[in-house]
């Protein structure tokens, strides 16, 4: 009896080492869904100054992405991809700015954002093309080229301290600016 208890695990290990994976391919469509989380880096210098990768408060721009789609064939998939991009940062670098109300007086003041918040809600439809799907066992079979387009809602709010210059000795006032708008959104991706 002891010998059987000892041999049984050895036989199971031997069988599992010699077994081969069975891949089942389907030609019909497959539905999928998922959630992603990422850090966002802006390429525009004004946005990077307002929302740096690592802000002085330790906060950074984040994105939570929900996606769901249908892989209609081996080579083509279509998905819906809504997401939310958000950040709250404090004590960012200052900048010189002439507000439209001050333009007539031709004074350029130094603005220092005390707090700034950013919210974006993009909703996109993405088409994916998988060019290497002849051999589904291959490591490159799930590489895709994608194009997505849609609309995004953007809302920003700044609470600025306004000084006469960058020495920040001549305090003028504190002012809050808020703006929200809809814009078209598109991107090209490889994954």
Image (tube, rainbow, N blue to C red):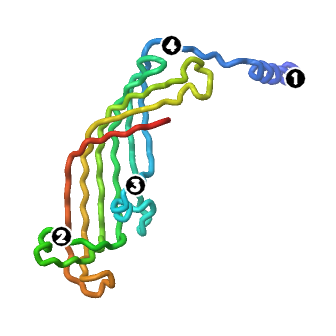
Q: Residue 43 carries which label?
A: 3
Q: Name the residue under label 1.
A: 2
Residues packed near mark 3 inside 10 Å, few (<14), some (14 to 19) or many (20 plus): few
Are discs 4 and 2 less than 8 Å apart at CB? Answer: no
* Residue closer to the observer: 45 or 17: 45
Q: Which sits earlier in the primary sequence, circle 2 or circle 3?
A: 3
Q: Mark 2 points at which residue?
A: 99
Residues packed near mark 2 inside 10 Å, few (<14), some (14 to 19) or many (20 plus): few
Distance in Å between CA atoms under marks 4 and 3: 41 Å
Q: Which sits earlier in the primary sequence, circle 4 or circle 2?
A: 4
Which one is in front in this view, the residue at disc 1 or the one at disc 2? Answer: 2
Which one is in front in this view, the residue at disc 4 or the one at disc 2? Answer: 2
Farthest top residue in view = 27
Distance in Å between CA atoms under marks 2 and 3: 24 Å
Could you tell me which secondary element the residue under label 2 belongs to? loop
Distance in Å between CA atoms under marks 3 and 1: 68 Å
Which one is in front in this view, the residue at disc 3 or the one at disc 1? Answer: 3
Q: Name the residue under label 4.
A: 26
């Amino acid at each position: 009896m002891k010998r059987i208890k000892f041999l049984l695990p050895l036989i199971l290990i031997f069988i599992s080492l010699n077994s081969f994976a069975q891949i089942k391919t389907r030609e019909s469509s497959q539905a999928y869904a998922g959630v992603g989380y990422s850090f966002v880096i802006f390429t525009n210098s004004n946005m990077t100054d307002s929302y740096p990768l690592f802000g002085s408060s330790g906060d950074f721009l984040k994105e939570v992405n929900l996606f769901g789609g249908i892989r209609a064939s081996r080579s083509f998939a279509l998905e819906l991809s809504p997401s939310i991009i958000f950040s709250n940062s404090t004590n960012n670098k200052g900048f010189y700015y002439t507000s439209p109300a001050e333009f007539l007086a031709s004074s350029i003041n130094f603005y220092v954002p005390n707090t700034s918040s950013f919210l974006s809600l993009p909703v996109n439809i993405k088409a994916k093309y998988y060019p290497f799907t002849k051999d589904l066992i291959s490591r490159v079979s799930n590489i895709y080229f994608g194009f997505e387009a849609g609309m995004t809602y953007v809302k920003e709010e700044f609470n600025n301290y306004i000084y006469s210059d960058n020495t920040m000795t001549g305090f003028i006032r504190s002012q809050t600016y808020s703006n929200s708008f809809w814009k078209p959104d598109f991107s090209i991706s490889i994954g």
